[in-house]
Amino acid sequence: LAQDSVPKLKDLAFLKDQLESLQRRVEDEVQAGVGQDGSLLASPFLKGFLAGYIVAKLRFSAVLGFVAGTCTGIYAAQNYAVPNVEKTIRDYFSSLKKGRD
């Protein structure tokens, strides 16, 4: 049992060192990016992360919205008497023009 735990402890110590090194690098990047006023929001690291997060969310919601809208439109067109919107608008404007004459 003691022989098995020595390599595991070495591995854990190695992983701990790697994590600490990574943490220091991230903290250094964040500190280097903090503006003169000391605001964390001025950090390019944080701005890049937030921009990427927002774009990913918007892209996903836009695709999901397009798919949901398309499926809803197909279902409605197949199962209900959906009027031709373009023809209805043209008829409305034609009636407005005729009313003025």
Image (cartoon, rainbow, N blue to C red):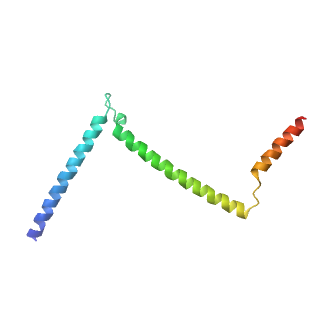
Residue 93 position, x and y percent, is 81, 41
Above or below for 40 versus 18: above
Q: Residue 80: name its quadrant.
A: bottom right
User: In the rendered image, which quarter contains the C terminus?
Assistant: top right
Q: How many marks?
A: 0
Residue furthest top as drawn: 36
Tell whether 12 sits left or right of 37: left
Above or below for 36 versus 47: above
Residue drawn at the location 20% of the way across and 47% of the way down: 21
User: In the rendered image, which quarter contains the N terminus?
Assistant: bottom left
Residue drawn at the location 16% of the way across and 60% of the way down: 11
Above or below for 7 versus 88: below
Tell whether 15 sits left or right of 89: left
Residue furthest bottom as drawn: 1
Residue drawn at the location 12% of the way across and 66% of the way down: 5
Residue furthest left as drawn: 3
Tell whether 64 sits left or right of 94: left
Residue furthest right as drawn: 101
Residue 60 position, x and y percent, is 50, 52
Q: Residue 94: name its quadrant.
A: top right
Residue 48 position, x and y percent, is 38, 41
